[in-house]
Image: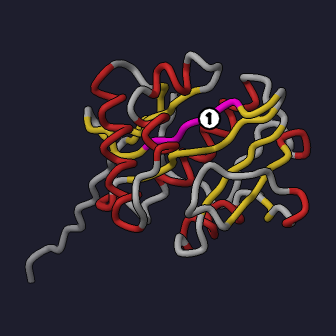
Amino acid sequence: MAAQTDVMTLTTVTIAPMDGAADARAFYDLNARWITQHFALEDSDLAVMTDPETAVVAAGGAVLVAREGERCIGCVALLPHAPGVAELAKMTVDPDHRGAGVGRALITAAIDRARSMGFDRLVLESNTALVAAVRLYESVGFRHVPVDERQPSPYARADVFMDLDLTRLPVGHRPGPSVELHSH
């Protein structure tokens, strides 16, 4: 009888700040792909996606990208909203990498980054059609914002409003099950 061997391939995914024009282009492409799959691109999308260095980073926020080798496979932005408040925005993972923990790793990295930048609260807007995304946000501690506490949205598609109080999370909090991803 021949010996059976199991082969396991480990892939390292790194999460780091956006670095240069190629990352900015990947940020645009990844977001345009998921948005146009479900909705229409809006002016507010394009204002952030077209020049994230100016619209996000220069405004005091951050863009994080997930890479597998040299390939950008996911991204998320932290957009300053008000003193102490940032919006978790434009989070997406390439369809070929969904379900592998990359989205959870991006959110965890974004929470860590928001804390290090001095933000006390994260807000986000989504849509009920994005069931997996809303469940992921809930699983890391985001709560649904009551109608009477919501701010006006620049997005016609937004019908889910959530927030996360970063001051209530213990330092070093790792939301949900751990994943074997490396971030720096």
In the image, farthest residue toward the left: 2
Judged by its main secondary structure, the magenta piece is strand
Relative to 141, say whether 181 is above or below.
above
The span picked out in magenta is 75-80
Relative to 77, say whether 83 is above or below.
above
* Spot occupied by residue 173 in the image (x, y as percentages of width and height): 77, 45
The foreground one among 154 and 84 is: 154
Residue 110 located within the stretch drawn in magenta? no
Quadrant of residue 109 in the image?
Answer: top right
Residue at 79%, 24% in the rendered image: 118
* Spot occupied by residue 110 in the image (x, y as percentages of width and height): 62, 38
Relative to 59, say whether 44 is above or below.
below
Residue at 57%, 27% in the rendered image: 62
The foreground one among 112 and 78 is: 78
* Spot occupied by residue 107 in the image (x, y as percentages of width and height): 60, 47
Relative to 7, say whether 152 is above or below.
above
**Label 1 belongs to which residue?**
78
| Type of the residue with mark 1 | Leu
* Spot occupied by residue 100 in the image (x, y as percentages of width and height): 43, 60
Residue at 51%, 31% in the rendered image: 63
In the image, farthest residue toward the bottom: 1
Residue at 9%, 83% in the rendered image: 1
Q: Is residue 37 left or right of residue 15?
A: left
